[in-house]
Image (tube, rainbow, N blue to C red):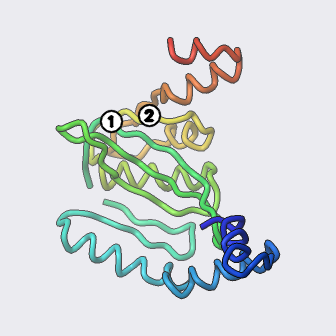
Amino acid sequence: MKVRTIIRTIEALYGGYVITDGKAWRAKQRVWKMIYGDWEDGYKQMLVLFNAIKAVNTGKHYEYIPKPNASKDGRHYRPVFSTDGTFLIGKYQGILLVATSCDANNKLVPLAFALVEKENNDSWGWFLRLLQIHMVGLGREVGVISDRHQGILNAMREEIEGYAPLHHHWHTQHLAKNLLQKDGVKGNFDLF
C-alpha cells in the first residue's frame, strides 16, 4: 500500500483526520516488520533459503560472502545467457545482478543472482567469473547478452585458465531503447 493510500484510508475511516506523510510511512514500516520481519532477519535467513534450494536441486551451487572481495571456484550450463543488474530499494541499498537463460520449452530459467554493493568492474567480474566456473564449465563457449554496461564489457575480457572465452552480444531491447532516446521517433522502435 502506498503512503498516499494510507493517508486517504485513515482520512476516510476517521472522519477527515489527516496524518502526515512521515506518520503514514512509519506505520507502513511497522506493519511490514510485523508481517515479514526486519531487513536484518531477512538477510540472516538467506543461508537457510540457499540450503533449501540446494537440497531439492542436486548439483546446484551457491556462494554467500558476507564481506566482498573473496570468492571460490568449480561447474556447467547452456550456451547463451542474459545478464542485467537492477537497483534494490528499501532500507538496504545495493544491486541485484541476474543471469537467465531459456530451457528446451523456451521458458525463462534463472541461472544465478548476486546481491552486490555497486554495479562496477569488480562486481561484474566476480559474478561472471563464478557463472563461468559453476554454470558454463571447462572449455565450453557461451554467448552473454547484456546492455553493454562497462563492468560487463571489462569482465568479458578476463581470461580464466582452462575456460573458453565468453562472447558478448547486444541485448536488442537496450539497443532499441537507445535508438528511441537518440532519434525520438517511436515508430522506429517498433520497426527495430
Look at 41% across and 39% down and name the residue there.
82
Q: Where residue 66 sits in the image (x, y, percent)?
A: 53, 76
Which one is earlier in the sequence, the residue at label 1 or at label 2? 1
From the viewer's perspective, tell me whether residue 9 is left or right of residue 131.
right
Residue 145: which numbered mark, if any? 2
Bin the neighbour count of mark 1 within 10 Å (Cα to Cα): few under 14, some 14-19, many 20 and up. Answer: some
Question: Which quadrant of the figure has residue 103?
Answer: top left
Residue 171: which numbered mark, if any? none
Q: Where residue 154 sits in the image (x, y, percent)?
A: 58, 40
Q: Which of 55 and 153 is in front in this view?
A: 55
Q: Where residue 170 sits in the image (x, y, percent)?
A: 49, 27
Spatial CA span between label 1 and label 2: 7 Å
Badge count: 2
Q: Is mark 2 on a helix, strand or loop?
A: strand
Q: Where residue 188 sits in the image (x, y, percent)?
A: 58, 12
Look at 24% across and 36% down and name the residue there.
106
Q: Are marks 1 and 2 in contact (CB under 8 Å)?
A: yes
Return the residue found at the far front: 15
Quadrant, the N terminus: bottom right
Q: Nearer the viewer, residue 33 or 162?
A: 33
Q: What element carries label 1?
A: strand
Residue underneath mark 1: 80
Disc 1 marks a residue whose amino acid type is Val
Q: Nearer the viewer, residue 31 or 145?
A: 31
Question: Which quadrant of the figure has residue 20?
Answer: bottom right
Disc 2 marks a residue whose amino acid type is Ile
Look at 53% across and 57% down and name the residue there.
96
Q: Where 172 sits versus 139, above or below?
A: above
